[in-house]
């Protein structure tokens, strides 16, 4: 019954302005209005990553629940983990509106939100009030006007260390001026080094070891991928998230396509998956990767895993397909495990990485 209501509601949400629809969705989830799919988790989708047991590899990407308002709803809908944020130390309103644009025919969205969020303290309070279990990551970023961006990330690690199961260091959003410059060698070395030093300090105080994942952009130049991967491996990061939105406009045109901001959704799938394959090969499959970009079906989710993703995340696909997509994806992944006769979804990770790594990024 709930799925039927959500199917009808999806059309209504798409008739609303994008940010109004997003806020309406969050409020519905806060009120408990969502389908529950926990029962559909398949044992072959379970895997232990970073010492944590994920019931399935599917999560919702950062940007959906910026302020940690609906963590438990995301998990109850059948996701194996939830990621909140991006959260910055101080609250900020983001860029001027309009700043979010749908392209329904292409299954895509362009956004230039600019890390709009309520800041560390608001998100921390909500996470501290949680009583349910489940794996929750915190995606941390820097305020637009900060003088020392790396310090904002360090502050995020320290602030959320007791409530986060893992951290994602987001240096890949195109909507905060200069943020992607943190992917340059010297800046990346400084940032990751300081983040890992803070983690080491907290571990020395007797706290548990929290995984640190670095989220990179899909627009990294071909010749820079291996160097960035080498640097991240050298700093012993626990994972790499591939990838964020793109400034490119693959296969789309028209007035909306000319809007500034990052493109997400179906048009991003090929480039982000080719990037994923390259990162898997560059890291020799030795660290877990999170595959993000253009997942709007079970088949595309499976392709990400075969290209090298241990875990996957989606967001834009939910905008056009609704929460039933979560169940559809987990069921498709379970069938793939059965067909391949593997004991776990881990047996499918990276089996087509070389193929995707050899595809052109700009195809």
Image (cartoon, rainbow, N blue to C red):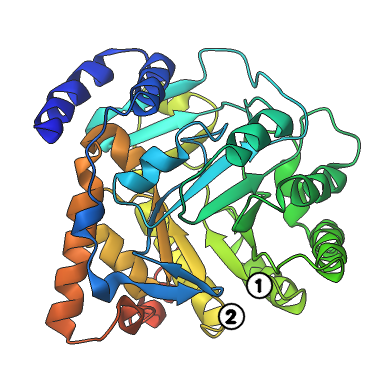
Q: Please, is residue 221 above or below residue 326 in the view?
A: below
2 and 1 marks in contact (CB < 8 Å): yes
Is disc 2 surrounded by few (<14), some (14 to 19) or many (20+) residues within 10 Å?
A: some
For marks 2 and 1 on the same chain, the one whose residue lies earlier in the sequence: 1
Mark 1: secondary structure: helix
Query: How far from the left and from the top, in percent, is residue 35?
Result: 22, 38
Q: Name the image quarter holding the N terminus.
A: top left
Q: Quadrant of residue 190?
A: bottom right
Report which quarter residue 50 is drawn in.
bottom right
Residue at x 78%, y 47% (from the top left corner) = 153
> Neighbour class for label 1 at 10 Å: few (<14), some, many (≥20)?
many
Q: Secondary structure at mark 2?
A: loop
In space, the residues marked 2 and 1 are separated at their CA atoms by 7 Å
The circle drawn on residue 283 is 2
Report whether residue 179 is seen: yes
What residue does disc 1 label?
A: 229
Q: Which residue corresponds to the image point at 82% horizontal and 57% vertical from the top-left?
A: 191
């Amino acid at each position: 019954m709930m799925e039927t209501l959500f199917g009808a509601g999806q059309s209504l949400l798409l008739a609303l302005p994008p940010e109004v629809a997003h806020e309406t969705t969050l409020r519905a989830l806060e009120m408990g209005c969502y389908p529950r799919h926990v029962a559909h988790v398949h044992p072959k989708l379970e895997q232990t990553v970073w010492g944590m047991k994920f019931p399935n590899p599917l999560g919702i990407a950062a940007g959906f629940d910026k302020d940690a308002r609906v963590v438990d709803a995301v998990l109850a809908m059948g996701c194996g983990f939830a990621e909140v944020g991006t959260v910055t130390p101080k609250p900020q309103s983001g860029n001027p509106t309009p700043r979010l644009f749908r392209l329904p025919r292409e299954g895509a969205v362009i956004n230039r939100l600019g890390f709009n969020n309520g800041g560390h303290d608001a998100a921390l309070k909500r996470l501290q009030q949680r009583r349910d279990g489940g794996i929750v990551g915190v995606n941390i970023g820097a305020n637009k006007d900060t003088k020392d961006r790396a310090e904002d990330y360090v502050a995020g690690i320290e602030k959320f260390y007791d409530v986060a199961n893992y951290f994602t260091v987001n240096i890949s959003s195109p909507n905060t001026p200069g943020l992607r410059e943190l992917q340059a060698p010297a800046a990346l070395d400084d940032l990751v080094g300081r983040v890992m030093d803070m983690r080491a300090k907290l571990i020395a105080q007797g706290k548990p070891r929290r995984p640190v994942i670095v989220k990179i952009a899909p627009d990294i130049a071909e010749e820079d991928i291996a160097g960035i991967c080498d640097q991240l491996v050298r700093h012993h990061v626990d994972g790499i998230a591939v990838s964020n939105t793109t400034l490119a406009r693959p296969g789309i045109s028209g007035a909306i396509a000319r809007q500034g901001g990052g493109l997400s959704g179906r048009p991003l799938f090929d480039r982000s998956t080719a990037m994923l394959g390259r990162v898997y090969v560059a890291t020799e499959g030795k660290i877990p990767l999170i595959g993000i970009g253009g997942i709007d079906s079970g088949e595309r989710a499976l392709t990400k895993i075969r290209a090298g993703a241990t875990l996957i995340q989606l967001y834009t696909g939910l905008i056009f397909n609704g929460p039933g997509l979560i169940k559809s994806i987990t069921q498709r992944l379970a069938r793939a495990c059965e067909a391949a006769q593997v004991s776990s979804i881990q047996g499918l990770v990276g089996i087509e990485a070389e193929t995707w790594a050899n595809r052109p990024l700009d195809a």
